[in-house]
Amino acid sequence: MSAVEDVATQTAAVEAVPKRAMTLGTGTSLVVLTLLLVVPLFVKNFIIFQMTMLLIYGVAVLALNILTGGSGQFSLGQSAFYAIGAYTSAILMEQYDVNYALTLPVAGLVCFGAGFLFGQPALRLSGVYLALATFALATAMPQLLKLGYFEKWTGGVQGLVVTKPDAPFGLHMSQDVWLYYFTLVITVAIYVFSVNLLRSRSGRAFMAIRDNEIAASAMGVNVALYKTLAFGVSAGITGVAGGLGAIAVQFVAPDSYTIQFAIALFLGMVVGGVGWLPGSFIGSAFIIFVPNIAENISKGLSGAVFGVLLFLVIFLLPHGARQIATVGQQLLGRLRR
Amino acid sequence: MELFTNQILAGISTGAIYACLALAVVMIYQAIDHLNFAQGEMAMFSTFISWQLMQWGIPYWVAFVLTIAFSFAGGIAIERILFKPLAKAPILTNVAGFIALFSIINSSAGLIWDFTIKQYPTPFGSAPFLGSQLISTHQAGMIGVTLLLLLALYFFFQYTRVGLAMRAAASLPESARLVGINTSWMIALGWGMAAAIGAIAGILIAPVVFLEPNMMLGTLIYGFAAAVLGGLTSPFGAVIGGFLVGIFENLAGTYIPYAGNELKLPIALALIVSILVVKPAGLFGRHIVKRV
């Protein structure tokens, strides 16, 4: 292996997804939103709880999608930010009696700060090296939360129990239904924010960095600032999802936020389609339901069944659920003509 | 001072495990440019096969050779069947494929051989090595085998036609194809070799960590860390990285208060990340200059 420095033409690790291909059309969005509003009126509480979790994980996958699909950076550490968000909410609610809705922006801000700071050293790393650094963060987080020094606030290994909020204004709704609609409102707000973010000047800067970092910096994009900013925004959104997750599950404990969770979020992003924001929710459905399906098919071999199903999905749809949407759009376009 | 030297010795002996695995990780990274997350599970499966052969009464070294041959073939088969169709898919899809493979192998090994912990024999014995309580003859043997393997790989890549072709295929696939190298099969060969090296690593590690389907979970993380620390492009760096990670981990566990067993891993990883911030391509990795 020669001593001469190798020169590589930089190829982007993440596919270039055009801005317009990142979202759904207005019509489709409205149909999906109506379904999400109406379905809970007709189903059992347990299913409503699962739909709530689907939205929450969807938001977390969406955050990763902004980071990876938007700015081309890779992270296996999302579970750490999710944990920080969950703990921030839980501690504020239980130790300081703050209203649950008010804890979410705090969780988001705390995680934005954490992500922005973590983005600083991560600036010098890319590809697998960045994956390793974020991976380190994810493995360290459960151990840090268990530390005796923080036990006053975090409850140590036992974690904290969170009380589920009642529906306000005397609404006749069960706690689950109320929490579902509360989550839905926040999810829609975050989704709209993300779509607009990627359409803005900052979003264009993210995508320029994703497609070619050197060219982007030559065009005058402040690469360092936007890369850390992408980390911060992604971590902040993940933090809000974490806070919501803590309220929905009513429990936070260090071992809920291990590296397996970060890997699950990553799989969700790939299955949904990297860079396609609505796919985040399809991916989240995959990581919530497919392990259960695998368990039902065979208890002893559930891991193998899960692996085979995952292989099937990536064989059929190497670009994730986005492919189905693209094909659907083309068909619709042909019908209209 | 004696505590310090002892901890370094103990670090070297655990480091040998990581070095072995890191070598396998670097091998496959050279061939396919991805980190194979299922590497540890492949090694675990191979180790189980050698154990099964020995249960059937086949002597150690025969089982050793058979297992390596099987792993080599298995690695090639996995590449041909599962990953060749994904060659044109995005990188992240490939990573998802590795995770799926991980899940399949782990779960099937659990079903075939169940999750009870099994003893695994060592050919080197477990007496103290040169009178030191910290390194047993097995661990010394492990270090020896790792170094031999490294030497063999060096000669393979530097002095054989196939080794040269593999290097060419990895560094500039298009040009390599133009001069008549079958790059697709070079990738398969890389998988086979990585699986075989993984099998050797597994067989060497098993007497220390005991044989069970999750035996590689903990060690693979260190193996990756070692490979990245040494530089993913350098097999020599991977081995040095392995020893360094072992030493870091032991020293952190001994000298940093509150660290104990729980925080050993995060501290070692944090140290590695700080090294990477200074040397982004790892200690011995080649720095790749990028152009637009």
Image (cartoon, coloured by chain):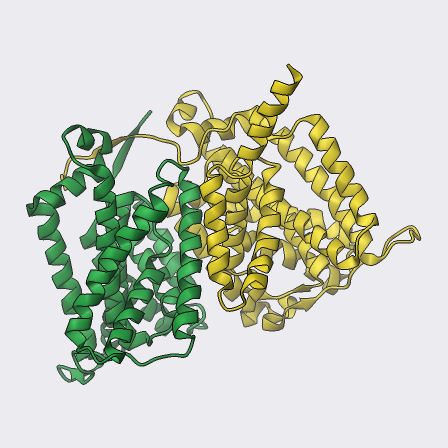
Is residue A116 among the parts visible in the rendering?
no
Residue drawn at point x = 10 percent, y = 50 percent? B156
Vertical placement of residue A3 versus A300, above or below:
above
In the rendered image, the quadrant that contains the N terminus of chain B is bottom left
Q: Is residue A187 left or right of residue B77?
A: right
Q: Is residue A271 left or right of residue B238?
A: right
In the rendered image, the quadrant that contains the C terminus of chain B is top left
Is residue A231 among the parts visible in the rendering?
yes
Q: Quadrant of residue B5?
A: bottom left
The green-coloured chain is labelled B
Residue drawn at point x = 51 percent, y = 38 percent? A274
Question: From this viewpoint, which residue is outermost toward the top?
Answer: A337
Q: Colour of chain A?
A: yellow
Q: Nearer the viewer, residue A92 or B120?
A: B120
Residue drawn at point x = 32 percent, y = 60 percent? B42
Q: Nearer the viewer, residue B26 or B82?
A: B82
Q: Position of residue B120 (x, y in %)?
A: 28, 78
